[in-house]
Amino acid sequence: MAQDEFELWFDKGVTDGLPVVPPTPERVERVLAGTRRDRDELVGLVPPNCGRASVEKIAVNAVMAGCRPDYLPVVLAAVEAACDPVFNLHGLQATTHFAAPLIVVNGPIRSRIGLNAGFGVFGPGFRANATIGRALRLILMNLGGARPGEISMSTFGHPGRYTYCIAEHEEASPWEPLHVERGLRPEDSAVTLFAAEAPHGISDHASRTAKSLAGSLGWSMACLWNAKHFPLYSQTMLVVGPEHARTFAEDGWSKADLKRFLVETIRRPYRELLPDEESGEGTNLRFADTPPEPDELVPKFAAAEELHVVVAGGTAGRFSVAIPGWLGSRNGSRAVTKRIGNSA
């Protein structure tokens, strides 16, 4: 009796727990047609196993994930970003934390390949989002070796470890898109990779001024990681829904204005951040050589540069989403942006 072609790949141990598309030579060749890069070109070494991510091996995993050929340049850019030392994939692959690489796509390629930036942006229903994110995950497992309970020691993980890919809803945004803010041109297509927890939804249907809405979003973000983790250990992404973005735009607030407000306003006195009988956790500032004075106000967000603001989601519903990152600049991860044009 012939072996089932789908069961074979489970037996090989190269799936993410879901069935994969068998990577026949014909399918791999079709996906490789999506790039001008040589199949043997080394894109990066995927930690912690330092697996060699050649263009061809990336294409194999893209086939398994269900990608079309025109998705391959996005996957290649995502792998380049993941292998950038600044992203610290080695640490992310092995941490007990729950973060996963979130792919944020900007530029003209979004519409060309059908990436979802609107309703249900973090959910199912769009092949490009689902398979591009899944391709990166398969690469992290099959080339990097990060399998749960072996190298990947994440206590919980989260659903974004299956696939985590969105496009910014640039058409609904009053602000410069993320890739422009990070130094690229509006006409460029780009991937930004961010080590991200699961989305934390924030509802505010009442605020009608930028200031009140910013306060509502900010104080909802005050409990990220822990209510006493001031300042927050990690970079943070705020995904502003289009209706909320319109409120900021109507009051003339820029992205920089929003970030500045969050840093300057979301603060608590140092004495409220110390461990007590009701909470054993406390701010790490208590281990500093010179801790703050008891009434000194400590910011939740250490600096505006630690905040990434994008606009995404459906145009109905006054919601936004906060996504904490993984640790900080010293031993954690920082967001990395790669131009997709370099990967075509």
Image (cartoon, helix red, strand yellow):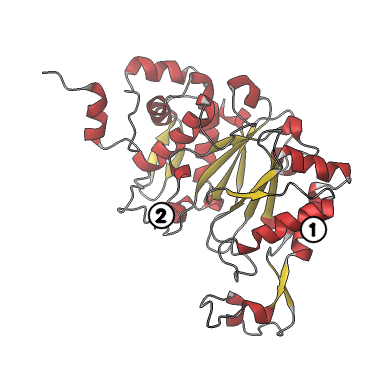
Circles 2 and 1, Cβ within 8 Å, touching? The answer is no
Q: Nearer the viewer, residue 163 or 59?
A: 163
Helix, strand or loop at label 1? It is helix
Q: Nearer the viewer, residue 90 or 130?
A: 130
Q: Is residue 5 left or right of residue 159?
A: left
How many residues crowd mark 1 within 10 Å: few (<14), some (14–19), many (20+)? Answer: some
Q: Which mark is residue 191?
A: none
Q: Amino acid at mark 2?
A: Phe
Q: Which residue is at 36% across, 14% downward?
A: 26
Q: Looking at the image, is 252 positioned above or below residue 191?
A: below
Residue 103, image x, y percentages: 56, 39
Residue 249, image x, y percentages: 84, 42
- Quadrant housing the C terminus: top right
Helix, strand or loop at label 2? It is loop
On the image, numbered disc 2 is attached to which residue? 156
Q: Amino acid at mark 1?
A: Arg
Q: Is residue 227 left or right of residue 162?
A: right
The quadrant in which residue 28 appears is top left
Residue 17, image x, y percentages: 32, 37
On the image, numbered disc 1 is attached to which residue? 260
Farthest residue to the front: give it. Answer: 206
Q: Looking at the image, is 64 positioned above or below residue 296?
A: above
Q: Nearer the viewer, residue 103 or 239?
A: 239
Residue 203, image x, y percentages: 67, 49
Q: Which residue is at 76% across, 58% downward?
A: 215
- Quadrant housing the N terminus: top left
Q: Is residue 210 left or right of residue 15?
A: right
- Label 2 or label 1, whichever lies nearer to me, is 2
